[in-house]
Image (cartoon, rainbow, N blue to C red):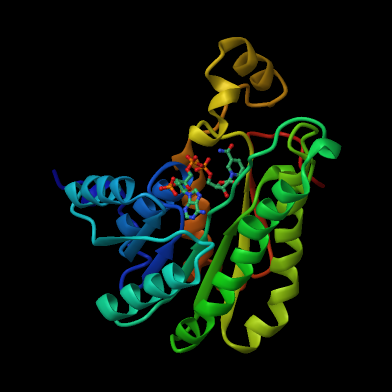
Amino acid sequence: MSNLGKYKCKRLDGKVAIVTASSLGIGYCIAERLAHEGAKVVISSRKKHLVDKAVEKLREQGLEVHGTVCHVGLEEDREKLFKLATDLYGGLDILVSNAAINPSFGSVFDTEEETWDKIFEINVKDTFLLCKEALPYLEKRKGGSIVIVSSIAGFTPFEVIGAYSISKTALFGMVKAFVPELTKRNIRINAIAPGVIKTKFTQAMWETRDIEKSTEAIIPMKRLGRPEECSGAVAFLVSDDASYVTGETIVIGGGLVSRL
Ligand code: NAP
């Protein structure tokens, strides 16, 4: 059933977007929102059945989307992603880098070297590579835009996910460090920092009601966020409404402590 009237705002008409890790959760909701606002969107993740399912759900709403398998850690997958977007839609205006992993819980000093490397490879290095590889495509358009999905844990590290938190802090540094060069190329870059959002990623936190309740207790809005609540900020950041906004981060955390 067509749901195209859901968002009256069509500020992304004519834009082409790639959203990584977009078969579920926050990435899916970002892809959905960008498409509702008029963008043609390429979605992706590692598992083909999840990508196919997401494409089907988005197309049922009458949205212009294509999907492909892309593990952000694989160069050939990233190449395929850019090729698909540009072959299908003639260029690229928007990159949303959303993939991240968090395989380690507990004391930061119990993090194995291999786990540390994996976290930094996927969360930081592959974000860098995606941005770098997107540049030639974004540069060709009148004004490209990148959004990196970081985390509130990058501002205020969570004790039990120390290495992940540090990797997300690095992304804030990345955004700031890229601004001068990207500005010369007419590309803006910003980040979002979600708080605790109810997705598969945080399932361990909300599948037990007691843990969910104790988490809610420290959030001023007294509830976890919904993944779709992260998507409007991204649509704003990649649109012309944010034409003078670069190097910034929008926190989406229900008031959870982040930074001044
Ligand atoms: P999610 O619901 O678990 O979804 C994760 C998505 O990432 C899936 O589509 C998964 O599909 C894909 N994925 C995982 N590893 C990938 C890889 N190596 N390459 C490509 N795709 C990959 O997670 P989420 O909560 O939406 O998290 C998305 C982003 O938000 C992450 O960067 C996370 O750090 C950030 N974040 C989340 C929260 C939260 O509370 N949920 C808070 C702050 C920040 P496949 O399995 O098919 O690959």
Q: How many labels does the image show?
A: 0
**Residue sticking out furthest to the right:** 109
How far across and how far down the image is residue 251, in percent?
65, 47
**Residue sticking out furthest to the left:** 1
The residue lying toward the viewer, choosing from 89 and 228, is: 89
Write the residue at 50% across / 59% down.
Answer: 236
Instruction: Give residue 39's quadrant in the image.
Output: bottom left
How far across and how far down the image is residue 134, in percent?
50, 77
How far across and how far down the image is residue 186, in percent?
57, 85
Q: Is residue 223 visible?
A: no
**Residue sticking out furthest to the top:** 210
* Above or below, 205 relative to 131: above
* Above or below, 95 relative to 138: above
The residue lying toward the viewer, choosing from 2 and 7, is: 2
How far across and how far down the image is residue 234, in percent?
51, 56
Write the residue at 63% across / 81% down.
Answer: 182
Write the residue at 64% across / 16% down.
Answer: 211
Q: In which quarter of the image is the N terminus?
A: top left
Instruction: Give residue 122's quadrant in the image.
Output: bottom right
* Above or below, 167 relative to 219: below
Q: Can residue 104 be seen in this view?
A: yes
The residue lying toward the viewer, choosing from 147 and 120, is: 120
* Above or below, 154 relative to 145: above
Q: In this view, does 225 lie to the left or right of 39?
A: right
